[in-house]
Image (spheres, helix red, strand yellow):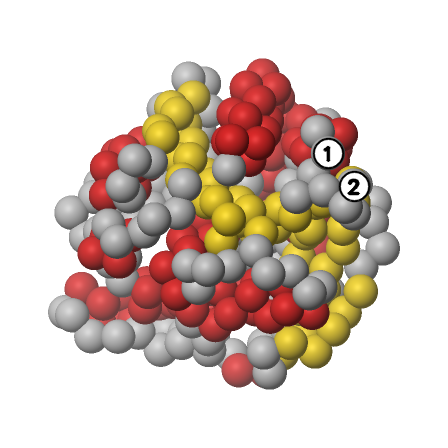
Amino acid sequence: MFMQKLTFFLAAIIWQTGALALDLDLEVVPLNDTHIAWAETGDLAGPPVVLIMGLGSSHSVWPEDLVEGLAKSGMRVILLDNRDVGLSQRYDELGNPVMWWNLLKVKMGFQPWTAYTLDDMAKDVVALMDHLELKRAHVVGASMGGMIAQLVAINHPDRARSLVSIMSSTGAPHLPPATESASEQFTSLAESEGDEIQEAHAWGFYPEAMPRQLMAVLASGDRSENLALLGTPTLVIHGLRDSLLPVEHGRHTAKVIPEARLEEIDGMGHYLPEQALEQVLGLIVEHLRMN
């Protein structure tokens, strides 16, 4: 049952690339009133690039070929586990929101319950940069990680050397929702329990954190006005087959960010398929080298 749940969601990243991210030794450090796990690879003297993964996903969900490709291109590649997943501090003791009630609150214009916010998670990234004594870094985020990367650029514009927003969104309310099938499979994965939880952890996923992180996404609201003020060089990558965040989300992100470059990938959904990895890697490396 659990493997069926993962068929749709981000596990496609792992299955279609054939491997998890590199087997790296993580260090856990106290940052921004939490504990964050991180690791790095590549040229330590090279331009730093921070990879931020999405909802309920640890750093290990980044495809190995992508991480290695960035490292071989001369980059200092820094990966972290967002708060509440992986080896970073977990917030299970806070419990989870009543989903239907909080979704209704959002629909009515009220803020949902949150254990933490996307702004907090962006501060985690900046705090890690401080820990590593990095004045600036390229920030690359996928899905929710793209939203966090956007907030690093919005709230800390002097720290983001460039931005890469992959299969992400501005949060604008007019954008199309996920398909019914995508929503159902997302909910099913988030409601995993028992042995399914341990199996998910082995694949780098933390379903128990997903409702809390989803509330952080919803509470972040519409970032369009702030993104329109960015001066950060931005690359937006989105799959034409994305059914969780349809391609209109990527198009709107590129539309509102001044001079952003949009690349739409045929055959890519809400994952990074093996056949598109070389193209995606090439686009990211080109963007980082230009900025």
Q: In percent of the image, x 69 and y 65: which residue is there?
A: 133
Q: Label 1's element? A: loop
- In the figure, is residue 290 to the left or right of 118? right
Residue in the foreground of this view, choosing between 88 and 159: 159
Q: Label 2's element? A: loop
Q: Give the image location of residue 208, x and y in percent.
A: 57, 65
Q: CA distance from mark 1 to mark 2?
A: 6 Å
In primary-sequence order, the first of circles 1 and 2 is: 2
Q: In percent of the image, x 51 and y 70: which residue is there?
A: 123
- In the figure, is residue 257 to the left or right of 15? left
Q: Which residue is mark 2?
A: 43
Q: Give the image location of residue 193, x and y in percent.
A: 60, 61
| Dot label at residue 74 | 1
Placement of 100 over or under 76, stated as above or below: below
Q: Give the image location of residue 135, x and y in percent.
A: 59, 61
Are the residues flagged by discs 1 and 2 in contact, CB closer than 8 Å? yes
> What quarter of the picture does the N terminus occupy?
top right
Residue in the foreground of this view, choosing between 27 and 100: 27
Q: In percent of the image, x 40 and y 35: which residue is there?
A: 236
- The kind of residue on which mark 2 rests is Asp
Residue 125 visible in this rendered orientation of the protein = yes
Q: In percent of the image, x 42 and y 69: which residue is there?
A: 119
- The kind of residue on which mark 1 rests is Gly
Q: Give the image location of residue 22, x and y in percent.
A: 79, 41
- In the figure, is residue 125 to the left or right of 258? right
Placement of 286 over or under 80, stated as above or below: above
Placement of 183 over or under 131, stated as above or below: above
| Dot label at residue 62 | none
Residue in the foreground of this view, choosing between 96 and 28: 28
